[in-house]
Image (cartoon, rainbow, N blue to C red):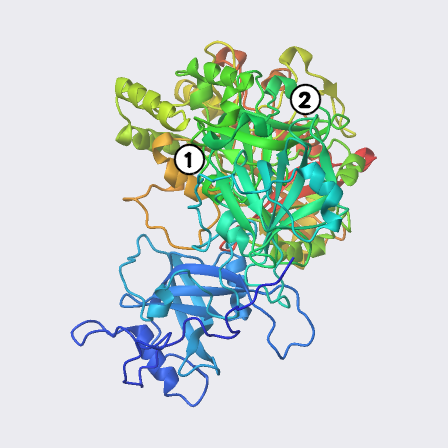
Amino acid sequence: MSGESGQPQAGPSHAGLDWPTLQRDRAGVPGGVIRRAGAQGPRSWIQKVLEQITGSPRQWVTPSEVVPVTVLAVQRYLLEDEPRDTVPKPPLYCYDVTISDGVYQEKCYLDPSLNSLVYQNILKVGIEMKISRVSCLYNEKRLGQGILCIDNVHCGETLDAISLETPFRNRAHEEKPERPLRGGKSHYLALWNNEDPYGDIWLTDKQPEEYNFNNIKIISLSHLEMTWANRRNFPALLVRILHKSKLRYYGKPDKKMIEPYQTFLEVADSSGTVSVIMWNALCPEWYKSLRVGLVLLLQDYSVKKSYPFRMQPLPVDPQIKLISTMEICLNLRDPPTNIIIIPEKQVKPEWRLPKLNHRFITRSELDDMPENHICDVIGMLAFVGRVQRSKKKENREDFWSYRWIHIADGTSEQPFIVELFSTSQPEIFENIYPMTYFVCTQLKVVRNDTQVPKLLYLTTTNESRVFITGHRGQPYTYDTKVKNFIQWIKTKTDSGEMKNTVIGGYYPYPPVPETFSKYSNSVKVESLLTAISEVRKEIEDLQYREQKRIAIQGIITVIKYIPHSCATESASASETLRNANQPSTSQAAREESQILERDGKWHQDDRPMSSQCFQSTSTSLSPSKKRRILQGPYAKPVAVPQPEFLSQTKGNKPGMSSIFQRQESTSASILGKARKTISDRWESQMWREKSFGLIDHLHYSHVYPESIPRKFILEHRKFLTQQYNSQPAKYIPPEGRPPKLDDFMSARSLGHFEVTILGLNHEIAIDVAFLPMYCPEDVRTSQIDTLLTCMNYSCVYPPEVTVSDRFPGPRALAGDIIKAATELDRVHIIGILDICNLGNNKVEVYLQKIYSPENTS
């Protein structure tokens, strides 16, 4: 590894203020004065603030007039240690905020004391903002340069539309590639993680080129392994890329590296496979152009002893030798590596370069796959969850970005459940939506057959790659299982699998084990139980889209049922949305076949959908094989239903939403009577005694629209995809008049419960949300009779229930649960809570499971 030289000078040197008091032409001075508002046009507020601060004896001012500005960009970067810093600090990420006053745009530095506004997604693109204090930070090594610093702000609401036509006041802010205002770093980072390439320094235009091999010496990897320690100069390598890792950013404030990136390539020739490490500035130049399967000619590389603790991925061909004693290093300098992509048509058979061998499995085969098995999958996306974030290490600012997805392949009633981490492919990760063909490689099996419900899902690895478009011509298209999937898809043009797809919402996964001891073994935390007095701090410490699971002790004292009141309105709005843009059936069929041939996606006209099953478990049992379990001191046998997300039923059985709609239209009188007899609230005597003496009562039971899974409508895929992605770093103008999230039909119709848990010391209480989940078989046999047993249910909507089954409806279920809650009066429980930070001061806390003292072992 070698450092980079020639980095920009530290300090505010890349894009300075223009000093309006200096009248001479600044065209030759970076950051000099440029455009001024014309005498006839409106006066720029930004310009007036600059004049005010340059005329002030202090380095900060309170603007004489505070007017709203709009936020166009929020961009993150790592700030180097200043020369006066003697003790290295942990990574400190800074933010440049681009604002517009309607006349000019200006890029400003956000004071680090306001970073929390970005962490919580309060300061974000598209909002109106008032700046009440600004300061100036000067670059003392350059003439007349400084940057505008935002010291105090009030963040307002999101605007419907913002104009991007206003010019930058300072020409330097328009220069490409974009550079941060402060420090010596040459680029910005992705806003929410460090794995994704972001900005215009990442090139994509490297193309294969014909090469004359007449006067070049090539060495095999096995020969290099035996002789590298005694060589100074290394002959060229001719290899094929078998695996490509996601990016690793290793920047730190005390390291003077311009582009501190690293990525691993696993390459092979006929004699073996070895790891190649690409360092620093070569990553922005080459990373996005290199893909698995390409043939490379590598010259002027270096070789070193391999890192002993890194696990190499398994070779695609078991016959190829795995070389683990050395690593190939590629650097922009020391020495300057020469990389050439060889066209596939120039590859000769006598080179005997290995072919790519994929490890595709079907969903029906997954049940027999062992823990940690590596595999590839192909299928149709049936569910795409919202982007979430998890801390890499406690007390650090670095996060992983991930989302849960479901993939159906037609070989099982159950989908693949995949924990999809960012693979340094933001152009795919941020643009996946249901009904799309999806391929993911190098997935690892995660399973636990000893817990109930069984745990079984796939998670990405460091070498995982994803594909959603351009499947034609990919090596995996010749795989038998891929061909079988394509044949299955062609038979599903009118099936429920194509229509019953879901996007977004709160996704409670992995499921919580049935006993507290198993839960204790499944989590990796310093303290297993969180005192209820510490919950507020746990909530406040969470950042945007971060989700955390904790365990608390307490007593359930209040349960209140909140019905899903907008189901009918959402259905009506959803129909309006569909009909507005829906082509005729014949036209849609023609378009679908054309699109399928073009980019490998299946686009279906989105006629009214039957309901789907939104659930969180990972193993399957057919109805005939459902096992019964006992849970808790009051528990009776309950069914463990099959944990599918999309209920793929045989025959034309009505979905849950159609059942609800039919019942509400044909049995209004029955439900009306039920409402009179069913209580929507239970309150314990203890609550009546203790509620007035509380020192703190936390209210986090509200379920926001973002947490409701929505039925996917193809015509609005762009809007829905944006809603469940992370907040972008730059403002994206909406296309036309966008709909509202509440216009889309919910994929669940049961409503939720507000549950109040009182701490054991009777001083603090917290309101949380509980989502009811049940199986129709047990509703029919009256086996939901305690809240504890209800917590064992997966989130299953009964697709096979008909009106004749006397399905009682959500309010009757609410009555059962509230009635059962009386058995928990004054009982000490352990509650497993999921805390979700949605940003912009919106936090939800979900009761995921409760344990009684008797079932903690």
622 over 220 or under it: above or below: above
Q: SS at mark 1?
A: loop
Mark 1 against mark 2, which lies toward the viewer? 2
Identify the residue shown where x is 70% and y is 31%. Answer: 788
Instruction: Name the image quarter holding residue 499.
Output: top left
The mark nearer the N terminus, 1 or 2, is 1
User: Furthest-bottom residue in view?
Assistant: 57
The residue beneath circle 2 is 640
| Residue 118 coordinates in the image, percent (x, y) | 51, 60
Q: Quadrant of the C terminus?
A: top right
**Camera-side residue: 381 or 705?**
381
Instruction: Name the image quarter holding residue 782.
Output: top right
The residue beneath circle 1 is 566
| Residue 702 coordinates in the image, percent (x, y) | 53, 45
Identify the residue shown where x is 53% and y is 25%. Answer: 378
420 over 125 or under it: above or below: above
| Residue 250 coordinates in the image, percent (x, y) | 63, 57
Q: Quadrant of the N terminus?
A: bottom right
